[in-house]
Amino acid sequence: MHEHHDHDELSRRTFLKALGASLALAGLDGCTRMPAEKIVTYVNQPPELTPGVAAHYATSMVLDGYAIGLIVEAHDGRPTKIEGNPEHPASLGASGAIEQASLLQLYDPDRATRIRNGARASSWQAFAAAFGPAGLRNRVGARGAGLALLLEPTSSPLIASQLATLHAMYPDIRVYFYAPLLPTALDAALATRGLVAQYDLRAADVILSAGADFLAAGPFNLRYARDFADRRRSPANGMNRLYVAECNYTVTGGAADHRLASGPDALERMLESVLAVVRGNAGNTDSWSAAVGADLQSRAGRSLVIVGDAQPPRVHALGAAINDALGNTGKTVWFTADPVLGAGDPNATITSLVAALGSGGIDTLLCLGGNPSYATPGRLEFSSLLRRVPNSAYIGLYENETARDAKWFVPAAHYLEMWGDARAYDGTYSLVQPLVQPLHGGKSVAEVLGALVGKSSLDVRSALHAAAPKQIVDASDDGWTAALGRGFIAGTALPRVAAAPRPELLTSPSRAQAAAGSVMITFERDPHVHDGSFANNGWLQELPDPITKLTWGNAALISSRTAARLSVSTGDVLELSYGGRTTRIPALIVPEHADDSVTLTLGYGRGGAEHTAGDIGVNVYPLLMDATQRTVSGATIARAKDGAHHDFAITQSHWTMEGRGQARSVSLGDFAGGHMPAAVRARRTLTIYDPPPRLNAPQQWAMTIDLGTCIGCSACVVACQAENNIPVVGPEEVANAREMHWMRIDRYIEGSTTAPRTITQPMLCQQCEDAPCEYVCPVGATMHSDDGLNEMIYNRCVGTRFCSNNCPYKVRRFNWYDYNARLSETEQMGKNPDVTVRERGVMEKCTFCVQRIREAEIAAGVEGRALRGSDVTTACQQACPTKAIVFGSLTDRDSPVAKQRQDPRAYSVLEELGTNPRVEYLARVRNTNPRLEPDA
Amino acid sequence: MSAAARPLVEQPPDREPWPVMRGEHPAAALTDHLLAPLWRSSPTWWLLFGLSSLGTLLLLFTVTYTVARGIGVWGNNIPVAWAFAITNFVWWIGIGHAGTFISAFLILLNQRWRGSINRVAEAMTIFALVNAALFPLLHLGRPWFFYWLIPYPATMGVWPNFKSALPWDVAAVTTYFTVSLLFWFLGLVPDLASARDRAPSRLKRLVYGVFAMGWRGSGFQWQRYRVAYVLLAALATPLVISVHSVVSLDFSIAQLPGWHSTIFPPYFVVGAIYSGLAMVFVLLLPLRRAFGLYDIVTEAHLSAMAKLMLAMGLMLAYSYVVEIFMSWYSADFAEQYTYLTARPAGPYAIAYWIMTVLNVVTPQLFWVRRFRTSTRVLFLASIGILVGMWMERFIIIVTSLNRDFLTSSWHIYMPTWVDWGILAGSLGLFGFLFLLFVRFVPSVAISEVKELSIELGRDGAELAGAAGDA
């Protein structure tokens, strides 16, 4: 994670040493690292641990209060890889970038390691004494007046029971919940409070998203992405159609069949028009609303309108009204109680806490997780209020902004270090199991709450069992163990609740059109760092944004027309003012962003003690007035007077394909009609050379990637990084095109310049049968294996880089520096022991997860059976939420990969070069509406 | 010393045909004059030597820095994995062509005027090759394993990949270097013996004596020497063609547009000789002035080399045109993009147009006789051609890589201070070695010049025609 700046600083002395050594060309090197002390052999082996063989455990990650079921791989007690839990409803086996990258957070060397009281080091006993019943009663009295807790949203039954115990102990205790990115707008739009909407995308033929990035954001995005893709996998059979109207270009917008760039105000008017169309009282409406409304109506009961979390309650009410009018409610969409504690309770919000703090009625405030001093609207001035609290404590992973403001600090346990429970978005009861002892003695929220009631060494595992809802967990130990092993208990989703939009919202006037010259701002979740919680995570910082390909920072996203109006280009710093506050932030032009509208993403410009997060991006929380109002109008924007400019670290700056046809798409009409355009069909290549020698291993590995279901979410990129020990290189190196990702998502725009559409294409080593890299390597460091892999032999590589020059796909990556030279002890623990950590000066690239192939071969050999192609799953394939990646052996003619290569959509990239890649792509099929695209 | 016969100063240009040697010089006087720089130095020499030593130190520093930290200190990236280092390599190796070309080619063609300039050209070749050899080594990710490119019987039984051009490149360059060094040294032996015989101190006598290898100048030695010299010339001549042909294969075996081209071997050889001739001018013209070689290096030499340069420049221009035509004729999108869009109008368009003007327009000066003998024009034009040829290699390497097949990978390359430092440092090392050479080694082939002088005395009319004061 400490990738940049300091990884190989040279002191004068080491430089002089190197000078001498390099002149002598001393290649001699001692290479043994045996400890000097006598070491003891491993005699008593625990039954579940075989050295060198990975163990897998089910657990759950909780984000914004909702659980996502995971399976975590551990080597000798060290978690090394996170996968989705195939049975868990929020995952279905998939995992997103954040779930994958949470592993790196566990090993983050910046994590706090000591308990302190003020600046002085303290202990857990001292904390438990100060905040236990004896200590607290002295301060807040018997009823606990003046005692307040601020929690991250949680759906944990254990914490619910602990809070109940606390309430019994301190009747006047006040409990608040806060996270910046919650679906609170819908809550305010419905007549019944405390509800969330659930969708069934498998049942929806036509979907309209109004600013909802439901495929990539939100607690159920992995599931929604899978369900959405399932309706597009075989385009000839009932393919769904997706309309997206949104301000910024998101993953969901990229997956849309029709996308409309519309600012928040236009979005509201569009939904009004669509509602009028579906209610049959449309007057003069625009062609988009008319076409979309008619399309939704033609599939009444099988259509769906989804409204984004950032939209105001009225837009949610309009969306719910359209769903009601179409008869979708109860079929493709329904409501359940929000599993998060305190949902819909206006007295549990951060605003109420701030009011209480302002009135001075709070003596003791415990912030359990989150980072409220940073991640709260600037107007609330939470940071200074917290500093004025007489007795405060913060439990967090890092010495961050909140830790600085609080008196006491206790390092928090990472979720891979603790016991816990939570509910998934649909209510499914899920369990959190520790994979490893707390690395830095961190404490979970449950342990801290235990200390508050006088149990300073709470047995959380037993408490969990005791607190688990009796109606769903049977009391027997066997049942409990089975639940832990599975990670969740099936059938515990919350029941449906009927709800209707608040009628007064529907009849209220729409938002006034913004004054000329002003712009609207939408505050969005950041695809890298969420709300800032993951700002210190190098994997996420370096993960290119799905659309803009921006890494290491955020920007004011604006359209090219708005940029022209302001006479700015990408990188020019803007001054953005709203509500009396001004922020300087560089502009980034996004094609087809809504005009006169700015999108800002939260989570950057951190000011804590974390090294990776520091000085990266701009904090836009000061401009945020209220976390429940994330679209605002009336902001002013101008180019900074000093003409400042910021150079972004962007991995792909070219948007078009220059007619090279690497990412192909076809309309459903053409595809179903059987007349694929020549530009889409696979091209036959002729060669004057002899074919390469036949490979005759029993398996011939190959991969297909369906561009029709790939949404570009980039989960595969982080999964590959985690699996293959790929280093993080930092913004300066990314800006110089030295990112190390073995897998990248290429993003192009295609179609007319007036209505460009994006297409995303995962690009990795194509494992060419006639590989251009192989014949140019002077030392034979990249060779072909008998089972069809283009192999990279690191310890033979001298680093001429000719292979990369001759790779038409440019998927090879070079170790320009010794990126792995100075890993902290914890970072070393996180490396996958099955994969070589590469040294400086060698080339590396995708291996088709050869370590997984060989592991499966060995396992099959041990079991005395033949290896099947389906025994191997690559890391990218396993993470992919939409199952767009298919891997297997071509020798098995019935395998999915062999079948997909026979698909009329299959083609290989740059096939005219005759490289014969083992990776093939399926052209994307766009289900366009003829009313909106007459020429399609 | 005795240059008493006549002052060796610049004379007004004569009419053509110019003599290949002007004036009558007794053999002893010639020897004294040409050996004079070995026994005394000048403030100018010290100044230049000091400057080039600083350059060499810069090279040492930047190379050490690179080896210590990794080639990340250069501007290279993916897609532009080769840039300055390989540009410098090809440029230096190209310069290293003229020496052997002038010596070996011309001796086989019986061009006797070569005797006055071949020593300088050969020394230049050696020093250019020393510089060139540095870069393939340095650009490796792990330079300490450079020997894996050499076919040696390793215990693991692993050989280089003979399908790749790079082991052949190593072989071609080392062969060329070895033969060039031998050829140069063999030519030096009689002159080193002269130096031994006239050395003013015992130490110098000893050192030159060791290198003279017992040369007595007997008829027997001369007879053997001549045979060996011509044989070596015959061996070196095909190497002039082969070495840059092999270097060009480093690029043309790739399928990258801009590299993947069958015209590369002759195109590279022509360009190499072109830049080498330019470097000969850059070294020879100041030397001619400093050491008073006007009678030995005459307008005949300058004009003949200028004509050669013009011929090479025309061939190079032809290659440029053919490349562009073939890319258009190929009807291949990537080829056409590289030649017709990326180079003339891409991010490196300025370098492309500088290259075109300097390499194609500059030599056209030499259609004019006056320019062929004007030292000022020759010197400036040669500098221009050297810059242009460096640009050419940069264009070939960088513009082909920075915008290749998939637009998603397109990325600009910008050199860092280390890149520039190594380039400047390698020029410093070149100057450093060359200055040592002119100070300690006879920089004109004395024995050949004396022979020419005697032959001119015998049948001067035949050789020199109506030479002015012969």
Image (spheres, coloured by chain):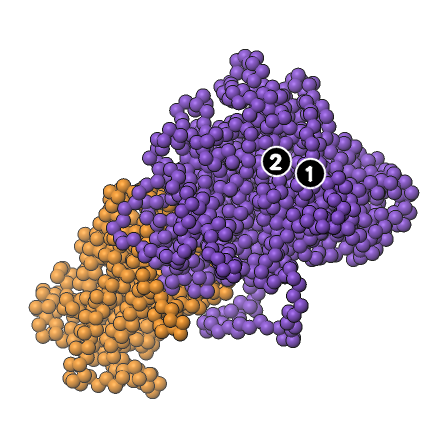
How many residues crowd around disc 2 within 10 Å: few (fewer than 14), some, or many (20 or more)?
many
Q: Which mark is residue A524?
A: 2
**Tags 2 and 1 both on a single chain:** yes
- Left/right placement of residue B30 relative to residue A803 reads left
- The chain letter under disc 1 is A
Colour chain B appears in: orange
* Whether label 2 touches label 1, CB < 8 Å: no
- Left/right placement of residue A746 relative to residue A196 reads left
Q: Residue furthest bottom?
A: B202
Write the residue at 79% across / 36% down: A353
| Quarter of the image where the N terminus of chain A is located | bottom right
Could you say where residue A318 lies in the image, as x and y percent from the top left?
62, 22
Q: Quadrant of residue B371?
A: bottom left
Q: Quadrant of residue A640?
A: top right
- The chain letter under disc 2 is A
Does dot 1 land on a helix, a strand or a loop? loop
In the rendered image, the vertical position of residue A506 relative to residue B269, given as above or below: above
Write the residue at 37% across / 47% down: B404
In the rendered image, the vertical position of residue A204 relative to residue B385, given as above or below: above
| Residue that numbered label 1 is attached to | A492
Letter of the chain in purple: A
Does dot 2 land on a helix, a strand or a loop? strand
Amino acid beneath label 1: Thr
Q: Work out whether residue A578 can be spotted.
A: no
Could you say where residue A473 lies in the image, as x and y percent from the top left?
73, 43
Q: Work out whether residue A876 can be spotted.
A: yes
| Quarter of the image where the C terminus of chain A is located | top left
Amino acid beneath label 2: Glu
Could you say where residue B353 lies in the image, as x and y percent from the top left?
32, 46
Q: Earlier in the sequence, mark 2 or mark 1?
A: 1
Relative to the observer, which residue lies in front, B190 or A198?
A198
Write the residue at 16% across / 76% down: B451
